[in-house]
């Protein structure tokens, strides 16, 4: 294994408090006859701590999605125990503290970005002012503020992932579960998502990340668990899993061929040799971002989502209420009882009363005109047959038209 100087595996913000605890957790799917069909999860143990980024890895069918659904309370476990914030996963109050981005963003195609976020904000019973404030910050953060009024059905896959991430953050969750968050994103969006994950972790939020892009996991995760066949095959910090102790790498400034020859002679006395002499290269991601950032600096125009802004302030604040405009009950009453509004209300009442009086007079006059005067019986008898006769003629003409 290659032994390198790397950063500490666990962030300083990670505590020992467990946010998600799974003990001997299993899930067996049965067929119509209640026979065991698939053992998706087989007695796994997980301990996800507050403030850490935990990676859940594995090939398709290894049990990752089933595990996430049990953590969310969408599936019941067959055996074992699971606790989220110390409560059962189905607890409603617990769900309010969770944000979830599924692998596929199932959004209402005919709603635009603002309407989509407003809908999810209403689900968490947020006030109108709070929804507006958070929507503005989230759209700027994910780079969709310029296309906020386009229906999400017209968005590209990467833009839909961006709005999906925004909806997962609308309730300022303490536990954020991300299933393939960078799928369909360009390198700029991928880098932004990774930076966001690290910033949220530094602010004490817990993140459970599932991804097939192992480089992304390696960049942001503190600990990982690798699943296969429903079992956790290996878990630990990224450094613990990746370190190769049988090989040593020395990193020094540029060496002249003469110095390299001297080093080879020293190694030869110890029955060692240099396997390769290489110059370091930068990552393709870094090169790509440098080129794009230079083009942006030069003012080159582009279409679609922008690079995005800073992280929304309500996601990093200790007290979310501190960012909301305060309006006490007394202030609301004073606003309603102000002179201008009282005069406006009085004018509206007078107008309504005038309209009602006019309508009443017109109705009475109309009824008086339509009411026939009462005539003596003797005067009405000679003319009684005339209306009946006209009615009969009219009915007959209608029947003839139908035939």
Image (cartoon, rainbow, N blue to C red):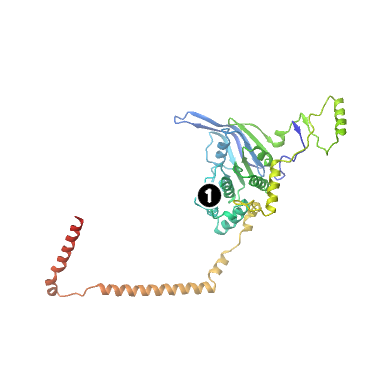
The residue lying toward the viewer, choosing from 326 and 389, is 389
The residue at which mark 1 appears reads as 154
> Which residue is located at x 81 percent, y 35 percent?
250
Position of 25 relative to 147 (above/below): above
Quarter where residue 146 is shown: bottom right
Residue 232 pos. (x, y %): 62, 32
The residue lying toward the viewer, choosing from 27 and 117, is 117
The residue lying toward the viewer, choosing from 27 and 295, is 295
Residue 296 pos. (x, y %): 68, 52
> Which residue is located at x 62 percent, y 41 percent?
208
> Around disc 1, counting alpha carbons within 10 Å, would you say few (fewer than 14), some (14 to 19), or many (20 or more)?
few
> Which residue is located at x 58 percent, y 57 percent?
130
Quarter where residue 145 is shown: bottom right
Residue 245 pos. (x, y %): 76, 30
The residue lying toward the viewer, choosing from 57 and 302, is 302
Q: Which residue lies furthest to the top in this view?
A: 271
Residue 391 pos. (x, y %): 17, 64
């Amino acid at each position: 294994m290659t032994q390198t100087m790397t950063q500490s595996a666990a962030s300083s913000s990670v505590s020992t408090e467990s946010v998600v605890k799974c003990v001997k957790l299993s899930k067996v799917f049965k067929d119509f006859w209640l026979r065991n069909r698939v053992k998706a999860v087989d007695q796994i143990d997980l301990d996800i701590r507050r403030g850490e980024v935990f990676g859940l890895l594995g090939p398709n069918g290894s049990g990752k999605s089933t595990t996430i659904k049990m953590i969310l309370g969408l599936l019941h476990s067959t055996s074992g125990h699971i606790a989220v914030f110390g409560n059962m996963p189905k607890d409603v109050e617990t769900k309010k503290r969770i944000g979830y981005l599924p692998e596929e963003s199932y959004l209402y195609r005919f709603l635009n970005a603002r309407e989509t976020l407003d809908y999810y904000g209403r689900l968490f019973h947020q006030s109108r002012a709070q929804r507006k404030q958070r929507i503005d910050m989230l759209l700027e953060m994910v780079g969709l503020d310029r296309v906020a009024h386009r229906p999400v059905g017209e968005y590209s896959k990467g833009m839909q992932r961006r709005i999906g991430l925004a909806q997962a953050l609308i309730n300022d969750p303490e536990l954020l579960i991300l299933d393939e968050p960078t799928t369909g994103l360009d390198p700029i969006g991928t880098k932004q998502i990774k930076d966001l994950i690290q910033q949220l972790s530094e602010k004490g939020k817990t993140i459970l990340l599932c991804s097939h892009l192992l480089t992304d996991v390696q960049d942001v995760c503190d600990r990982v668990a690798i699943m296969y066949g429903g079992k956790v095959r290996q878990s630990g910090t990224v450094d613990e899993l990746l370190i190769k102790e049988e090989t040593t790498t020395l990193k020094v400034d540029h060496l002249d061929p003469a110095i390299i020859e001297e080093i080879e002679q020293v190694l030869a006395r110890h029955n060692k040799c240099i396997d390769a002499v290489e110059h370091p290269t930068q990552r393709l991601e870094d090169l790509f971002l440098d080129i794009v950032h230079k083009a942006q600096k030069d003012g080159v125009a582009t279409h679609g989502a922008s690079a995005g802004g800073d992280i929304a302030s309500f996601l990093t604040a200790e007290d979310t209420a501190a960012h909301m405009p305060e309006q006490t009950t007394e202030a609301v009453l004073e606003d309603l009882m102000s002179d201008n509004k009282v005069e406006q209300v009085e004018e509206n009442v007078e107008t309504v009363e005038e309209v009602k009086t006019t309508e009443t007079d017109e109705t009475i006059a109309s009824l008086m005109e339509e009411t026939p005067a009462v005539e003596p019986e003797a005067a009405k008898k000679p003319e009684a047959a005339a209306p009946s006769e006209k009615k009969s003629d009219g009915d007959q003409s209608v029947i003839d038209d139908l035939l």
